[in-house]
Amino acid sequence: MPRVPEKDPPDVLNRRKCLEYLAALRHAKWFQARANGLQSCVIIIRLLRDLCQRVPTWGKMPAWAMELLVEKAISSATGPLSPGEAMRRVLECIATGILLPDGPGLLDPCEKAQTDALGSMTKQAREDITASAQHALRLLAFRQIHKVLGMDSLPASKASARNRKRRRDGSETGEGEGEGKKDKKEDAEEVDA
């Protein structure tokens, strides 16, 4: 007589949901052990979460993959990174094509089988985020990080305005440098007299 599969009782939890929650628990434990202690890691994750909420292109990146990527980028540095350096390093990793289908990919360390953490992303979404990271790096290079962060530009400080003015008029390149020192010396002698 063939065996008839037994039907689960109505009070049994959904198997798929239970597996998702177990994966989330493994992710939280991994994060606590690996990423939480890294300098600047949590800050960069918060910045990228904000970017994912503000920019639809970035919103297609899975949160777990983003956390993995930030941890890998920061932990592979030779020393501690400031938040600015860490942000640049993460954007550089993305801009070089790590997300692209023919790139190295991003393996999930919490799964026994080799699982790509980026598996749910479409090819177009991967290309869009890569291009957006390249654009963000250009903005950083031209001191426009406020555009990447989605905030107003900070007012220039008086010291940086003087330095920019000095560079423009050529006094920083050494032209007339000796005369300025001489004038200051003469002014000091006049004050003493």
Image (cartoon, rainbow, N blue to C red):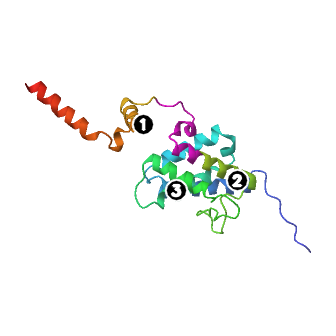
Pick the quarter of the image with the C terminus.
top left
How many labels sit on residues? 3
Q: Residue furthest bottom?
A: 1
Local crowd size for mark 1, using a 10 Å CA cut-off: few (<14), some (14–19), many (≥20): few
Q: What amino acid is at disc 1?
A: Arg
The residue shown at (37%, 32%) is 162
Mark before the other along the chain sequence, 2 or 1? 2
Q: Nearer the viewer, residue 159 or 135?
A: 159
The residue to which callout 1 is attached is 168
The residue positioned farthest toward the left in the image shown: 193
- The amino acid type, in three-letter code, at marker 3 is Glu
What is the span of residues highlighted in magenta in the rendered image? 136-154
Q: Nearer the viewer, residue 133 or 27?
A: 133
- Nearer to us in this view, 170 or 140: 170
For discs 3 and 2, the disc positioned in front in the rendered view: 2
State the image coordinates of residue 20 (x, y, percent, origin top left).
67, 54
Which circle's residue, 3 or 1, is located before the other in the chain?
3
Q: Could you say where residue 145 lies in the image, as x and y percent from the top left?
A: 52, 40
What residue does disc 2 label? Answer: 127
Disc number at residue 40? Answer: none
Gap in angstroms between the C-alphas marked 3 and 2 = 21 Å
Q: Is residue 123 magenta?
A: no
Estimate the spatial distance between the alpha carbons at disc 3 and disc 1, rounded to whole Å: 41 Å
Amino acid type of the residue tagged 2 in the rendering = Glu
Residue under numbered circle 3: 71
